[in-house]
Structure formats: C-alpha cells, structure tokens
Amino acid sequence: MTSVDLALAGISLGAIAALSGIGLLVTYRTNGVLNLAQGGIATLIAYAFREMVVEWNLPKWLAAIIALAVLSPGVGLLLERFVFRPLARRRASAAESLVASLGVLVLILGIVAGIWGLGSRSDAPSIFPNSSVRLFGETRIGVDALAELLMVVVFTIVIGLIAARTAFGRQIRAVVDDRQLAELSGVPADRVAAAGWAAGTTMAGLTGVLLAPRFQLTPYGLTLLVLETFAVVVAARLASMPVAVLTALGIAILQSELKQFTLDGNAGQILTVLQSNLFIVALLVLLLAVPKLRELGSGDSGATASFSSRGAPPSGRVSGARFRQDYLGKLGGFALLLAPLTFAPSDLRSAFMVPALGLIFLSMVIVTGYSGQLSLGVAGFAGLGALLSLKLANGNLFGLPAIPGIWSMFLGALLVAPVGLITGYPAIRRRGLTLALTTFAVGAVVSRFVFEQPTFANGLYLDPLTLFGWELSEKAYYVFELVCLGIGLLVVRNLHHGRLGRALLAVRDDSSGAAAVGVDVRNLKLLAFTVSAGVAGLGGALLVHSSYSFSADDFAPLQSLLWFTAVVVFGADSAAGAIMAAAFIVTIDVLAPAGSSTLAIGILALALGWMPGGLASAVRGMLRLFAQHLADSFVDPNQRAPRPVPVRISAVGHLPATTGITGASGIPGVGATLGAARAGHYSQWPLGAQRTAADPRLTPFGAELVTMVQQYAAHRQHAVVGQRAAPSQVSQEETR
Amino acid sequence: MSRGVLQAVGLVRRYGGLTAVDHVDLVAPPGMITGLIGPNGAGKSTLFSLLTGVEQPDEGQVMLGTTDITQMRPDIRSRRGLVQTFQVPSLFPTLTVADNLLVGAENRRRDYAGGLLGLSAQGRSRISRTAERALERLGLAPKGPVTQIVEDVLNSLGLSDVRDTIAGTLPTGALRLVEFARALCAQPDILLLDEPASGLDAAETAKLSELLRSTAADGVGILIVDHDVDLVFSVVDQVYAMVGGRVVAAGDPETVRNDPTVRSVYLAQAPLAAAGQSGETR
C-alpha cells in the first residue's frame, strides 16, 4: 500500500478517536469531570448494540437509534442525576469526582462482565456498509471513514457554535465557573450539566459502536482502547476541540503510516508494538511534554485528603483503653489472616492471593493515602516486580546467575524501586488529573512494551520455592507471604509515624504550606513513590507465585484502576482497609462468578458520596455510633447533662466509665466497646476529676448492669486481697 | 551580624510585556519589622513570591546573609531560616494544632531515612550524635528539643487550649494564629508575612501587632506585605512603598508617609487614602 492509502486507512480510527475526544471535552467543559468511565460506557453501548443486532435480530438502524439516541444519553442522564449532581452540590473536590468516575467505570465493567462474560466476540456488527468509494485513480476510501469524518466535522462545528454563539454556551461557562452563583443568577444549572453528560455519553456510545467491529469485542480491551484516546484531550490541554480532532487524526494516520516500515532486531520489535500502540505512547509523551493542563476550577484536583479521613497517629502517649482496642483489633486481624492455614489445599491456594494483593494495596496507601498523590499505575510496578523476580530466579536477567526463588522476590522488588523513583519525578510538579493520567500511561506503556512482549514474558518457569534447601509446602508459602505482608505493614507504619509521618501528611494536606516550613516536599514525594513501587513489586512477585504463571492480564493497566478504586473504597489511608480490600476481592472472586468483585467495588465506590473516608472510616463511625447507643442505654439520655459530661451514678456510688466498666474490671465486650466510645465521641469526658454536675438517672437496663458490675467487683475484691486499690475499688469501699 | 539579613538586589520579574517587578532593592534586617505597601497591581505579591522562592526572578539576586539563595526552592530557603505565611492560611487540616507546629519545628533536618527504618528520634541521635553536634555547630539543627519549642510557642501564643484540636476545624482568626505559631516553630531568622491581618477583627489585629513586636524583639526579622496600611504603619520600623513594580519610597514610616509620590498614589485610591490619612492624623 502507498502512503496515501495508509493515511486513508488511518483516517477512520483517527475520526473515532476524535469523536471520543469530543465527548470527553464536552463532559469536562460542561461539568468539570474528566470522565474516566468513557471507555466503560462505550463498551456497554457496543455490547448492547451487538446484543440487539445479533441476538435479537433487530434491524441495524433501529438498534443504532436505540443504542445511540436512547441508551447512551440515558446513561449520561442517570450518571448526572445520581452520581455527579450530588457531588457538585456539595462542591466535592475534583479528586472525588475523578474517583466517582472511576467507580462508574468499575461498576459498568462489572455489569458488562456479569451479563456478557469476559470472553471476546468477533461478531460486532458495523453500522456502515463495508464498501468504499473511489477518490482518484486506484485510491479508495471506506464509506465508514467518510461518514465518521463527516460526523467529526459536523460535531466540532455545531458544538463550537453552541459554545461561542448561544445563550446556552454562556450558561455552560457560568455553571462550570461557579454552579451556585450561576443558579442564583437564574441559570438552570442541573439542566445544563445534564445536557453535557448526555452529549458526552452519546459520543462515548458512538465511539464504542464504531470501534467494536474493528477489534475483538472484550470488556477490558475496548475500554482500554477508549482510555488511550485520552492522549487527544491531553494534547488539547482539556480545552481546544479543534486541536483534539487534529491530534486524533494525526496520531492515527502516523500509526497507520508506520506499517510500511519494517526493521530487524529489537528496533523492529519496538516498531511492531508502536504500530498498534501509538496512542498510549502519545499519551505518555504528551503528558510529560505539555506543561500544564487547563484544569477547571481551582485545579486542586490533587487534594486526596478528601478521601483520607485520618490525620497522624497521636504523637503523645496513647491511653490504655485505646491501646488495648488497637491491640485487640490487630490480634483479631492477624488471627483471621492465619485462618486459611486450616483450609483445604484448594482454598488455601485461593487465599495465596490475599497477602499478595494486600501488599499491592499497601503500596497505594503509601502513595495516595499518606502522601496524597493520585497514582493509577500500580499494576505496572507489581508486574515489573513479578517479571524481574521470575527472571532472576530463572537466571536470565543481565546475565546474573539464577537466584533462589525467595531471594529473587526481594531482589526483584528492590529493582522496581528505582523505576518508582523515575516515575516519581513527574509527580514533583504534577498533581491531580495530570499525575493520575501520567501514572496510568506509565503502567499502560510498561504493559504493552514489556509484559505483552514474548521476548520478555515468555519461557519463564516457576520453580518450587526453597528456603535454605527446604522446599516450601503450601502452608509454608502462605506463612512466608504473611511475613512479607508483615514487612510491608512495618514499612507503612514507619512511614506514618513520627516526624516522617507528619511530614508526609503535611505534604498531602498542603504541599506549599509544607514547603514554607522547610518540609522537603520533592524528596518526600520521591520517597513515597520509590517505597511504594518496591512494596508493589514484592506484592506482584508473590501474586505471580500464587497464580503459578506470569500473565500480562494480571497486570493490565485496567487492573490499576480497579485496584485504586478498591483501595479508596476501603479507606485510602488505612493499612487495615488495604488488607480488607484484598480479602474482599479474593473472597468474592472465589465464591461468585467472574467480574462480581468488580461490580461490588463499583457499587461501593458510588456509595463513597455518603462515606467520604471510605469503608474503613464508615466502619469506625458505625462502631462509634453503636458504642454511643450502648452508652445511652445505660444512662437515660434525657436525664444527662450536655456532653462532655462527668459520669456519676449516685445510686450505687461512683462508677466512672473510665475505671469501673472498662476491661480492667473485667466485662470483656463492654469494656472494648466503651473504649471505642471514649476514643471517639466521649473523648472529652473528664477522667474522674470534677464530678459535680447534675446526676443523670439510670435506665432500668443500666441499673441492672451496674448492679451486676458491683457484685462482680465485690466478688473480685474478696478474691484479690492485698492488691493495690484501684480507683474503682476505692469507690466501692466508700459506698459500703 | 550578617547572618539573617534578607536582601533583594536588582530583582526583575517580567510576564510577557509587563514588568511586574522592576529592579527592586530591599533589605530586611533581623530584629526589625519591615513593611511593604503599595496599591493593587504594584508588584508586592510578585516580589513576595520572588523572596520566598515560589517564583524565579528574570534578573537580580536574593541574598540571605552572605548566601545567594536565588536558585533555591522554598523548602530549602525555609530550612535556612526564611519562613513564610500565606494570604490564605495554609495549615495541614487533618493534623492537630500541636502536630502542625511539630512539622514546623522538625524540619530543619532532612534525614527522613532513619524514620523509614523505624528509628525513633532518640535512637537516631544515639547513632549519629556526632553528626548532630556538627549540624548544630553549623546552625542547622534545631536549637532545642523540638517538643519543647512547640510547647513554648503554644504557651506564649495562648494556644494550649487547642493543642489537640484538628486544625481543619478552627475558625479563620485561630488559623492565622496557628499558622504564625507554626512559622515561629520553624525558628526563622526572617519571617515573611503575606497580609497577616486579612480576615482578622480589630481585637485580633491588635493582638497580632503586639505579637509581631515581641517576635521582632526576640531578634527575628519580619517583612509584612499588607493592605492594612494602619497595621503596617503602626508596627513597622521601616517601610518600602511600591508603585508599578518599582520602589518609589523607602525609609522610616514618617518619611514614607510624607513622600509626595506615595501621597499622590494613595490619594488617587479612595479607600487606601482614607487609611493613609487616618494613619497620618494619629
């Protein structure tokens, strides 16, 4: 084929990418949300269109109308009404909107996988007839390419005119600028936002329907293709539609032109990959080259503190009850993690995934929860850790001798750390959206150029692991995984405590404020990325041993998005949340059909609007509420002085909550719960000093309980003679 | 003593065709309060950013003592004793007030690696006591145990009651005070304050000027940029007045207030003129 033919062949893909870019820009410029779910929506509509045409035998034109004029805008309207309008109403940060759109993506992927399965289909119907028209001489152009190009031109002009020339365009700008102010000036903000969403998702649907027949239709594959077109909107700096269109056509034509070259050796291999992956490379290059995206609003989309609910661990001495509560929690968690050792071998093998995924999630806690960077490329680090450790164990990395499996894992993880350092460099000056996209692009490029390449990823074999000559049994391997997880937890703990922890949180909360008092923002960001990459690498190495083979799919770029969403859902700054998330995903994947965990995480992500700190903080809040409720059932709330209140129970003498009924006196469950209550709501109860306020009256239940406690304490006092009198016992004596 | 004098030498900053800061010289010595005034668009904020390192000048130098700090990042400047506060208080909202101050007090050293390995501050100092002593001799280590600094500042600013309050829950006036306290904990030689009185009521402003005087009396140099001309003229030892990117008058408050250029500029601006005159009639 000649250059002209190749260029014409590229036009179709370029036009589709342009349509996707137009959709993204429309949603962004009308709502301030970069819709990461665009790919998911495209996939959903493509599947629906195929279902109608192939399975239900509807005529194509009817199916197209239903898919593009009913379903697509319908999805947009639903999203606006139930997901993004509530966020806009409470002026959620751009980071929250980004996570919400990730949640939508994950949810839609879960739905698609749930309905149509994860397998690929090659019978996606094409809207346009498969014919071509003659341009000149022997040169022909496909009808589809012409039609798509026409659509791009028409949409660009129409949208451009609406934005520049109509009152509606002005309203859009007003709503994006300040929604509340616009509403006060009589602009129907909700309608404007809804129109933006409907137009954006219609474009997404169109993209999906047009792309599907050109490639295999798979839930993840098509989604990723659409995500790659983000290169187009980055080139447009999130603003200029003509630039987006020209970039899309340019990249697609260039990619097509590359097909006429062949090279030998490594260069040839790179060229082959480039011939089908120019968009993702362009995304990375553009992100590194474009100095600043023209983000809407304050551009503070990096403020991840909004989904990290907690500050530093207390710097002073921790109260005994709080300490006991933490200790009990940790012990319980550890016991649960040990439980798989009692499982049947096949279940134990499934449980292998938990510590491995847990480590990968911990790496995200470090980067996102503690240092506040949005990182969507963790699968890349994990995959590199897996690949490098395997290569070290096989003895084909840089001519190094084969290293025993266990040590190769640690060494592999250490080798990933510098990659994290390099990735961290763009993070010094980038925040929020730009950083999120950059890390995603890094993960995607690594996936395409390394994991999917036979040279790197084929012919690797997994030897049984040995430690000092002993072959690890499955149980021993699980214990080894737990040790690794322990190391990860230790690293996380050290990153969260003391001066280092405070400095990291300072960077997360306000990086310019941190710099103003001398916090080394740059090196701390790099440190977080480096350590996080190492931890993720170790997790990846464990993961590959858990699944007995290296598969590029395990570390696909979309995994990063799913994992990130899971971590945020379970509390981005909670180490326990990270491990719970891992256990949750693995459990659901084992018990339910494929894609169920994706669906569950998606649903939970959309519920984030109601629990801003993630599940972990929601659970903490519930415990607190429950403890408060329990405390209220001891003491009649109506009779109690406003909080903070001293507790004095006159009927039976002093029974301060701090001494009488906590663990020390020995009613197990109650003590722990009240400990929780004190740590939270009742934190201001004076600890026994002033007991002069009004006496609250006990409820019947409370009175009964107090009598029990009194009897118990009396009994105990008789039993333990000569023991130093605790305050509660002193008060008991006073009563008697 | 030359250490601690902040000096701007021939600073120029252009944005396209506009010269926002045009060959500005400025000296802020330790133990003195220096004011920087000027109408909107005079280039005050740009000059401030050049001094703190948020922006780089096109020409000229920023000196701290005998060191050229022009190319240094804000955090390095801060570790060298040049600490700033912001127009909008920028605290760490999820940390307690005490922890906010601790971050300020702790960061004259950068060795985060020890923390990563889980060494406590005590453990580290045992390991590297010699190194620490050497740092102290260079004037880079904190002058006392960090927690002591924080307690002292909390007490002297009357913030002890809120020491364990999460900073994000405080009202604006308190935020300003905490931010000021955090800056003090970083043990500055020079404090750069960007509109410290904005958002404060009259009583809080009075308290602030008292605080500024006592801080300066402790030997800290202070540079204030503020619209509140009353505040500036009531506390400063010397004033720089900027118009159109240039310093048009400098010297003690009396001289600057009577400078014809300053008078004409402030008379042209109604609200500021009133403020300026009320300062004059006092």
Image (cartoon, grey):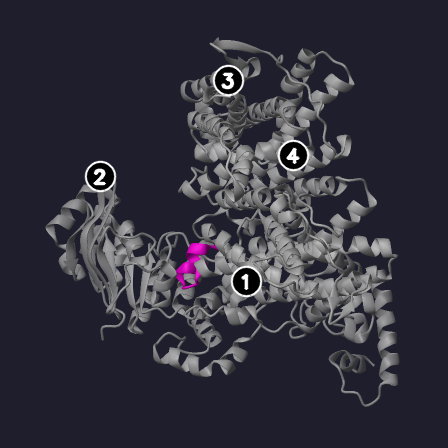
Q: Nearer the viewer, residue B161 or A140?
A: A140
Report the residue marked by disc 2.
Answer: B17
Q: Which residues are magenta?
A: A510-521
Q: Position of residue A529 (x, y in %)?
A: 53, 56
Label 2 CA crowd tier, 10 Å (few <14, some 14–19, many 20+)? few
Please tell me the numbered disc located at residue B165.
Answer: 1
> Do labels 1 and 2 touch, CB within 8 Å?
no
Q: Is residue A474 left or right of residue A94?
A: right
Q: Is residue A673 visible?
A: no
Tag 3: amino acid: Leu
**Mark 4 falls within which chain?**
A
Q: Nearer the viewer, residue A298 or A634?
A: A298
**Mark 3 falls within which chain?**
A
Q: Secondary structure at mark 2?
A: loop
Q: CA distance from mark 3 to mark 4?
A: 24 Å
Tag 4: amino acid: Gly
**Mark 2 falls within which chain?**
B
Q: Position of residue A23 (x, y in %)?
A: 54, 26
Residue A626 lies in magenta, yes or no?
A: no
> Do labels 2 and 3 touch, CB within 8 Å?
no
Please tell me the numbered disc located at residue A149.
Answer: 3
Report the residue marked by disc 4.
Answer: A221
Q: Is residue A213 left or right of residue A472?
A: left
Q: CA distance from mark 4 to mark 2?
A: 50 Å
